[in-house]
Amino acid sequence: MKKILFWSALSTVLLTACTNSSDIEAQTGTDPVEPAPVIEDQTLETVSEGDFSFIHRLEQGDYFVDVLYKDEKVGEFFQDLPEGGLEANQAPGYRAFVLETTSTYAYLALEPTGLSGYLPFLGPWEVARVNLAVPDFKILTVNGLVEDIASDDSKVASSMEFTTGISVMNVTQALYPNGSNVTNFPAPDEFNHAGGARFSDDGTQLAYVALSGPENETSAIYVVDLATSTQTELVRQSGQLKITGWDGDMPTYE
């Protein structure tokens, strides 16, 4: 009899607590917490370029790009997505492509798409090097967006984080970073953007564009002598200049 009375009393207490909780919710106007949307695992697209294929997919709400070389997976790119995924948060999608190849390596890039706003310089968020003989897949760790790789596989240029300019580091250091062998080339203070960097054909020089904008947009091209770490202004004009390549020891532009 005592047990029956105990469970009866306990049930009454629990019912009262639930009722009070509902009353408080009604009084405060607090909505119940809705569960986060479920993001289904799915393959978005497969893109092929030469011997490489890039399989874009969502898994547990995150973005992956499987990288296949001659139909064998050699690695993957990965990007965290905000809760809700691509559509719910209007997060960018990504484009994966072959940035450039040399006799020994292929450099593969992952670049966001669908970004908005004033973005005068866009470039890969990540670049991986694939040794075609092995093959293996290693992500380069740099200070910002990847700008260019020297044709002899020795150096990588990237936009500088927190400061306007270009960084240059040894590719080996980018593959196995330890914080050393990075040389920074800051643009003059009058500029607030820098990018579009290109190494000369022999890898001894680097040209980049420094830009002031978006109001009264002005840009200049600077040429860096990597042996002496000196940089020289080549040309300046209103609007945005673009480096198109090199002709001997001089960059070409438009």
Image: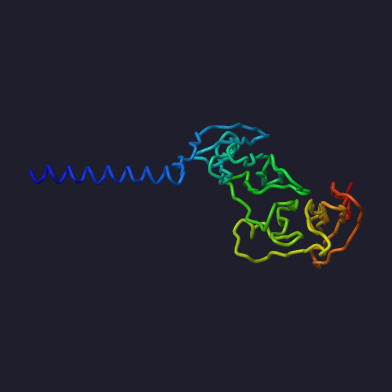
Question: 129 and 202: which one is in front?
Answer: 129
Question: 150 and 14: which one is in front?
Answer: 14
Q: Residue furthest front?
A: 27
Image location (x, y in percent) of residue 235: 91, 56
Q: Residue furthest left?
A: 1
Whether 135 is drawn above or below 195: the answer is above
Dividing the picture into quarters, in which one does residue 72 lie? top right
Image location (x, y in percent) of residue 213: 82, 53
Looking at the figure, which quarter contains the N terminus? Answer: top left
Q: Is residue 182 left or right of residue 219?
A: left
Residue depicted at 72% across the width and 65% down the height:
183
Question: 223 and 92: which one is in front?
Answer: 92
Residue depicted at 61% across the width and 51% down the height:
139
Residue depicted at 84% across the width and 52% down the height:
215
Image location (x, y in percent) of residue 237: 92, 53
Question: 62 and 65: which one is in front?
Answer: 62
Dividing the picture into quarters, in which one does residue 50 lie? top right
Image location (x, y in percent) of residue 35: 45, 40
Residue depicted at 62% across the width and 35% down the height:
53
